[in-house]
Amino acid sequence: MTLFLAQTAWLVPLYPLLASLLSLLWSPGLISRTGPRPCGYLNLLLVSVAFVHSVLALVALHSNSAAGSAAIYQPLTFGWTWLQTAGLRIGFDGLITEPALIAMTLITGLHVLVQIYSIAYLEMDWGWPRFFGSLSFFESGLCALVLTDSLFFSYVIMELLTLGTYLIVGTWYNQPLVVKGARDAFLTKRIGDLILLAGVIALLPITGTWNFHGLQAWAADQANNRLALPGGFTLIVLALIAGPMGKCAQIPLHLWLDEAMESPLPSTVLRNSVVVVGGAWVLLRLEPLIELSPLAASLLVVVGGTSALVGALIALAQIDVKRALSFLVSSWLGLLFVAVGLGGIPVADHLMLVYPLPMALMLMAIGAIVLTNVTQDLTQLGGLWSKRPLMGIAFLSGAAGLMALPPFGGFAALRELLALTTTSSQPALLGGLVLLTNALISAGLIRVFGQIWGGRPTVFTTRSPEVLWLMALPTLLLTGLVLHLPQILVRNGVFTAAGALLPIPGWGPEALPLLLSTVVGGGLSALFYLRPHPLAHLPAALGGLQDWLAHDMQTERFYHRTVVGLVVGLARLSAWSDQRLVDGFSGATGEAALEGARRLSLTTSGRSQAYALTLVLGVLLMAAWLLSGQGSATPDLLRPLR
């Protein structure tokens, strides 16, 4: 029975997919007498079924020794063929492994908490069918993404997730900013997806397979036998990493995450915690191919390092609390890209493992504040520690889980990354980048906490009522999980404790400078923002710098003047040529034909004698032409042959 639960884990994505499809019954009003609330409860029920199945499958695979050893050396597989013709087979091949089941348990568990949270957050909203259906659609796609062993279907699933982003960001579609945010998020992610598609198509003739394990075997054969790489292989790898760059909101494809903040906050919890990690999951599975291309690995380090540093700087200047946290998402995932570029796959795995729960917890705590204080502007909040201490503790717990603060999970993962940089070709530069980014992330998180819970109450926070228990319950449950995460990871062998007297997970030689960077960044931010300090606002002479950072370093304006301007210019040229040349030529020839027909119609008198005379004259002219032609040809015909 236990092995059966693991073997049928492929059913997990189907539960939320069924919930998403059933939501359509309420969305167009086919079921209207019950109101929208039963749709939310139905989605919560099926998502809970998916979570229970994931947990039981993970326990079965972990506890059953026979199934566990088979999962390591010969994983449980499933698949179905979608297309098979002329020697080409495209199918959904899946692997049921322990990492995949851990990821599915995390995804489904967070979805259960978020859907409970959403019932309270959207209590008075009538868009439940569309919203809850989109959440379940997200969950189904993410679970399928971690199960599939096919690069092609990974691309297909990421396309569906892009569609889901468009739908869920546009939930409140009657607001202009929401429409713009949904459109921009969709188009920005499509850039990376299209480049990824080109790489996927070009990869098949070279490797002969789209399955990740087949690609791993092909890459190992190339490396072990020192075979020459096919021409253009580096370009293909660069195209493959463009998709994860877009999904993980890395520069220059990072604008979509900021625009997506127009969606309801419960969807932001999922998007910023688990949806963005979907791109990192695909990137880690492409690592054997990336190792064959030093240029691609170097590009990952450059892109990740730039995103980490720039994202943390931009977050410090944001006044919208959701956007401040969204840029910190890009910053943290940038560090993961650096780890992949340096070849530290275990380090990248640990960074990806410790990230989702703390980020989801902080956003849940923020949502409880935004809902009851009717603003998400940091300058209009403050003084809530005495009124909302539980949410403050929840936010601090999530922040501690992301910054390098022992004994929390983020410290061990970042310490491993710092140790990895010491073995690179640029240890001082990359090590300094990690330390500076950690200091800036710590400063950004403490800044958000200080401006909401520190200082004095404002007009918006003088009366701050408690939220419904349906929002407080999942937030506090998640707080407990985040606080216990380090010990869970130690017990499962992910991290090791320093010793019996000092059981700090992940402690090592680089721990002290990392801890010092956290203390410096977080301490200075606490000094400036817990009690408002004049230095918290830059002087007028430097106000332009703060405005420049607040507007994402004018990246959107740059895109409008370059990429968008080029596209608009080409579109206008095409419209002009279509109107002046194509339509002008066809229109002129048509008008000429009509004018000729009109003039010819004037020669028609309707008299039969005139028609007969015209025919006779035509016959006589034709006969004269024929006779003249024969006359000129007669001498040649009569010339005697010699």
Image: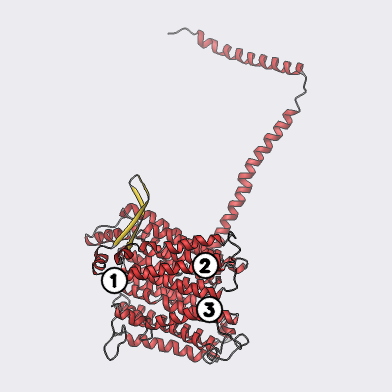
SS label for mark 3: helix
Find residue 132 and name its label: 2
First in sequence: mark 3 vs mark 1:
1
Find residue 62 and name its label: 1
SS label for mark 1: helix
Q: CA distance from mark 3 to mark 1?
A: 36 Å
**Amino acid identity at mark 3:** Gly
**Amino acid identity at mark 2:** Phe
Q: Is residue 305 visible?
A: no
Image-quadrant location for residue 213 = bottom left
Describe residue 215's horizontal placement relative to residue 18 as left or right: left
Q: Is residue 489 above or below residue 503?
A: above
- Position of residue 581 measured from the top left corner of the image (x, y, whole percent): 61, 45
What quarter of the picture does the C terminus occupy? top left
Describe residue 324's horizontal placement relative to residue 342 as left or right: right
- Position of residue 572 measured from the top left corner of the image (x, y, whole percent): 60, 55
Mark 2–mark 3 contact, CB under 8 Å? no
Q: Which residue is mark 3?
A: 367
First in sequence: mark 2 vs mark 3:
2
What quarter of the picture does the N terminus occupy? bottom left
Of tags 3 and 1, which is closer to the observer? 1
Mark 3–mark 1 contact, CB under 8 Å? no
**Amino acid identity at mark 1:** His
